[in-house]
Image: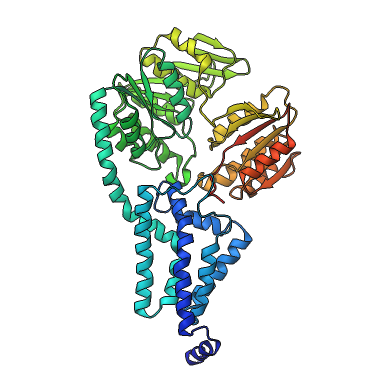
Amino acid sequence: MSGLDLQAAAAASGLDAPGLRWAAVAVCALAVVPAGLRWLRVAQREHYIPDAASRFALRWWASGSANLVGLAIAAAAMVVSGRWAGTALVTGVVVAIGPLGLDLRGTSAPLAWTRRLRTLAGVWLVLQAAVVAVGAVLGVAAPVAAAGALAVPAFVDLACAVTAPFERRAARSHVERARARLARVVPTVVAITGSYGKTSTKGYVAHLVGAARAVVASPASFNNRAGLARAVNEHLAEGTDVFVAEMGTYGAGEIAELCEWLTPDVAVITAIGPVHLERFGSEERIVEAKAEILTKARVGVLVVDDPRLRALADRRVEAGLRTRRVSGAGAPGEGAPRADVRVANGPDGLCVWVDDVVVAEQAGVDGRAGNIACAIAVALELGVPAADIVSRLGTLPTAPHRLQPSTAPSGCLVLDDTYNANPAGARVALQALARVPGAGRRVLVTPGMVELGARQAAENERFAEAAADVVNDVVVVGRTNRRALRRGLAGRDVAVTVVDRRAEAVDWVRQHLGAGDAVLYENDLPDHYP
């Protein structure tokens, strides 16, 4: 069919009538509002990283057949709108209501209209409006408006990139205030990083060091530049002896920048694992990024059960830098790495060695041995008497939602590990569930683990295989890792239930479990994940 024939067909169908054309443009322009709310929420929950909205858009549109069909229809309508402008209406409608399952405001991960989000939303709206205006000037308003509606996640990411320099400048004054406060209070700074175990170790350090000195720890997961500046400005009181800071990172250079103004006296690396692997690319890069915490530290504390951290410790010692090697792998013996502090945490409780001499045997203590070993080493380094450390081991705090035990009204034992999301931690959680005495029915509730890059499917499959040796039932939450978890459970004597949301899983547990049963909630993805 020739171009003239197409134009005639369009005119005859009415799909290119001026009224319908501008109605389609208006629908597409209005559709970006609900779409923008969805992807702005994703950007906020993902810490305003410039590619987050686009990454999650791909996940959501591919998360089910209905969303895939909707995306295909919207894209086809956008392409056809170059000839029949009215078809852009279809694109606008699909974008306004999809992807199905991603709420506008959210429940577990609600949209919060902070000053930063308002700024981002304003910049995003200007970018979207500019595209529509250009399309109108060029006489292709309908296809451009349709393309702009489909590309809302990309425009949100662009707005994140545009506003990032401004946000860094805005945060600078808070960092300078924090620097001045640190100079005035002059606390000993203990900085803790690691792929996992940071928050638990921070709590252990504050608890053990608090036996002898005034301690302030950064709250919750305030572990980036803005969060730590806020923690110092709002919580570092006069007379504080020790400030314990959790330091996180999504890439190279971030911890080094933190250490420029929050310089650690004692630096701790708890563990290396594939957490945030899709952002780092390799575990070697994770090691390099975490090792930045050691650069200016007077003392380094490293868990030498990991050969990469053992190599870091060896290099520090060879360079004449003070280093505490610690281990959570158990008793000294042939084949065990050299360690100044060792912890074994078995069925009978906790055993602690300092310089290969037993200093404590404590029943009824649970917790990740490597994290406890780090905290003991820090406390010893800061001059806390060994007797005071031992006296406090029996009252180590449990970080909220990190293998936290409780009993439901039904009498069912609940192990809440919803803030854990790494393979090593998942293995420890399964071991804890297996140790529950006399449990009649053992159940795992999980959406699986995320941000593991190319290893994500395989790691979740292995996790499910390990779970099948411990549990009677698995409740799989959401779609993100559903296939991998089900592959790991295939052919095993385990009942599998699939739900879309954690609330449905909780209802299932309430209906099916009672006294004598035990359930492990392993990880809990916020609802901006499919």
How many numbered circles does the render carry? 0
407 and 3: which is toward the camera: 407
Whether residue 490 is situated above or below residue 190 in the rendered picture? below
Residue 21 at what x, y percent from top left? 46, 80
Instruction: Tell me if 460 is positioned left or right of 38 in this view.
Output: right
- Does 344 sit left or right of 201 as displayed? right
Q: Which residue is drawn at 41% across and 46% down?
A: 47
Q: Quadrant of residue 94?
A: bottom right
Q: Image point 72% across, 29% down: which residue?
A: 517
Which quarter of the picture shows residue 513?
top right
Tell me residue 269's x, y (percent): 41, 28
Q: Position of residue 75 (x, y in %)?
A: 52, 70
Q: Estimate the x, y position of residue 240 in percent, counting from the top left.
A: 32, 20
In this view of the protein, can residue 141 be seen by the observer? yes
Residue 48 vertical placement versus 283 (above, below): below
Is residue 160 visible to us here? Answer: no
Q: Where is residue 59, by image quadrant?
A: bottom right
The residue shown at (52%, 64%) is 96
Foreground residue, 234 or 472?
A: 234
* Colour approach in the figure: rainbow
